[in-house]
Image (cartoon, grey):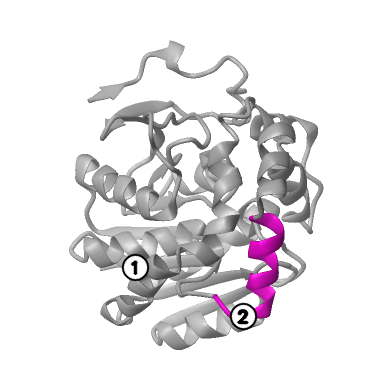
Amino acid sequence: MNDTAPNRRPSWVDDELFPFRSRFIDIDGHSVHYIDEGSGPTLLFLHGNPTWSFLWREAIISLRENFRCVALDYPGFGLSTAKTGYLYLPEEHADVLTTFVDALGLEDTTVVGQDWGGLLGLSVAQRRPDVFDRLVLANTWAWPVNGILHFEAFGRLAGNPVTQFLGRQFNLLVEMFVPTGHRRRKVTSAEMTHYRLAQNTSERRQASAILPSRVLASSAFFVEVEEGLSDLAHLPTLIVWGDADIAFRPQERERLEATFPDHKTVIVEGAGTYVESDAPEEFVAAIMEWLPATSV
């Protein structure tokens, strides 16, 4: 059931910065916020951590003239609210996302996934192969990373109980990840306000605080995603990669390129983890130049 009543959208959301109609749908007891803009081939935008659909706003403003742009917030992120007992695990997010795709009746859809959104999008595409026909992957991964020093260090540093406590109490992940994930430009104070207020209580920050620990702890889920990649390997894939990212390295990009032979790679020089927000014009141009050639 949808609820588009204006009072469901907090007053701190700036209508000029986020010029979209906020929609809400009940998914298994969660109130899931999403936007659904434009018409044409469907693009499903999936965010990472600690962001929300706000991350995609500039790309969607440009792309909605030619595409149907759907972007949601996972439970506990952005304007979505999780039901009691939700643990904010990526496995759970994948289940919610699958039900969301079913509820909207999406078809002929392109996954546009960044960070955790890439992995979650690939998981859902494996479950709903008749829905998805193309992939856009930006600074992401899709396999277990246990034993890889780079990710072991991140998982243990950012996912330990002390860091989780700091994340819940002081919004540490937003204060650190959002600025450092933008390398081409400085995030404005108004933008930072929208990331901060989306997680304005310690309870609201649990969703983002838990995910770093799952980089190592959710390895069984990642194995499932990795094992299903062969079922998606035929899909036309656009890889848009910020090459100044400190989280995802050339090794991850090269592995995605090897996984999806029908790919085009666009390197965005100097861009960070959040390439779609760091260099939105180049991100949009990459999609616009690639998608017509692969559309049915």
Q: Which residue is mark 2?
A: 148
Quarter where residue 29 is shown? top left
Disc 1: which residue: 134
Q: Sequence order check: which comes first, mark 1 or mark 2?
A: 1
Task: Label the magenta part by its dominant secondary structure.
Answer: helix
Residue 277: % across, % down: 65, 50
- Mark nearest the camera among 1 and 2 is 2
What stretch of residues is rendered in magenta?
A: 146-159
Q: Is residue 275 above or below residue 255?
A: above
Q: Which mark is residue 90?
A: none
Mark 1: few, some, or many residues within 10 Å (few <14, many ≥20)?
many
Q: Percent from the top left, x then y, of residue 103?
A: 21, 40
User: What is the C-alpha distance between the residues marked 1 and 2?
Assistant: 29 Å
Callout 2 crowding tier (Cα within 10 Å): few <14, some 14–19, many ≥20: few
The amino acid sitting under disc 1 is: Arg
Q: Is residue 106 left or right of residue 60?
A: left
- Quarter the C terminus occupies: bottom left
Residue 155 place in picture, x, y as percent: 63, 63
Q: Quadrant of residue 108?
A: bottom left
Query: Which residue, as the protein is rendered here, is positioned at the far front?
Result: 161
Q: Nearer the viewer, residue 129 or 50?
A: 50
The residue that appears at 62% across and 80% down in the rendered structure is 148
For the point 23% across and 41% down, which residue is it? 104
Tell me the amino acid under the disc marked 2: Ile
122 sits to left or right of 157: left
Judge whether residue 104 is colored magenta: no
